[in-house]
Amino acid sequence: MNPQLQQLGQLIGLALSGDEEALQTVVQQILPQLESQASDFRNLAVFVRLLLKGEQDQSKLETAFTALDPIDKAIVQLALQTANHGQAEAEGTEAETDDEKLVQLIVLACGGDQAALTIVTGLIEELQNDKATRELGKALERLIVDEERNPAILTRKLDETGKALVASILEKL
């Protein structure tokens, strides 16, 4: 992610975590720029506004999230990490692997974070639609939706990579 987009994600995260100065900057300067006709980030602005107002309606969040492109989703993920783990940890996200980011997102979803749950729900659907990753999708759904925590049940049909991912998630819960 380029530095400007990383800064955008971090600023949005700070606003989401209650930083008044960041919130003012996002609402008064950033969102109007994102919403402009010439911007490719209009859908991101819609999603951020929902998060800032504390939207709890899962269907609204899912609809807005579905409209995001991969860059927007990466910005949202960084914003959520910043909001939930503070600025110092967010600055180290580039060194994290995709698996570590996924683990963090799933842990947030298990903890009730609605935005993270929306992102993970979309990912689970994608995993379940692909024959090669269907069992991992099912395991993650059991972990998040059914709150299953038994590693034997969750990893029964998974390959070694899937088992390691589930073990890492369970360790952080």
Image (spheres, helix red, strand yellow):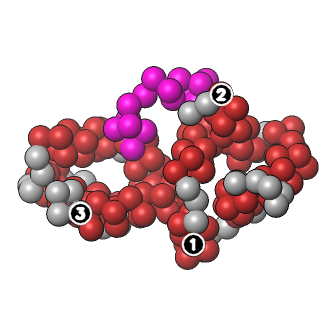
Name the secondary structure under disc 3: loop
Residue count near mark 2 (Cα–Cα under 10 Å), binned few <14, some 14–19, many ≥20: few
Residue count near mark 1 (Cα–Cα under 10 Å), binned few <14, some 14–19, many ≥20: few
Do tag 3 and tag 1 residues touch (Cβ < 8 Å)?
A: no
Q: Which amino acid is tagged 1?
A: Thr
Q: Residue at x 59, y 25 (%)?
A: 91
What is the distance, in whole Å, between disc 2 and disc 1 at their CAs?
28 Å
Magenta-colored stretch includes residue 141: no
Residue holding disc 1 = 63
Residue 85 lies, with reference to residue 39, above or below; the image says: above
Q: Residue at x 71, y 38 (%)?
A: 8
Q: Nearer the viewer, mark 3 or mark 1?
A: 3
Residue holding disc 2 = 3
Q: Which residue occupies the foreground of this view, 139 or 74? A: 74
Q: Is residue 35 left or right of residue 84?
A: right
User: Residue 63 occupies which quadrant of the picture?
Assistant: bottom right
Task: Give coordinates of residue 104: x percent, y percent.
Answer: 43, 41
What is the distance, in whole Å, between disc 3 and disc 1 at their CAs?
22 Å
Residue holding disc 3 = 130
Q: Residue at x 38, y 59 (%)?
A: 123
Q: Residue at x 21, y 57 (%)?
A: 133
Do tag 2 and tag 3 residues touch (Cβ < 8 Å)?
A: no
Task: Give coordinates of residue 117: x percent, y percent.
Answer: 47, 60
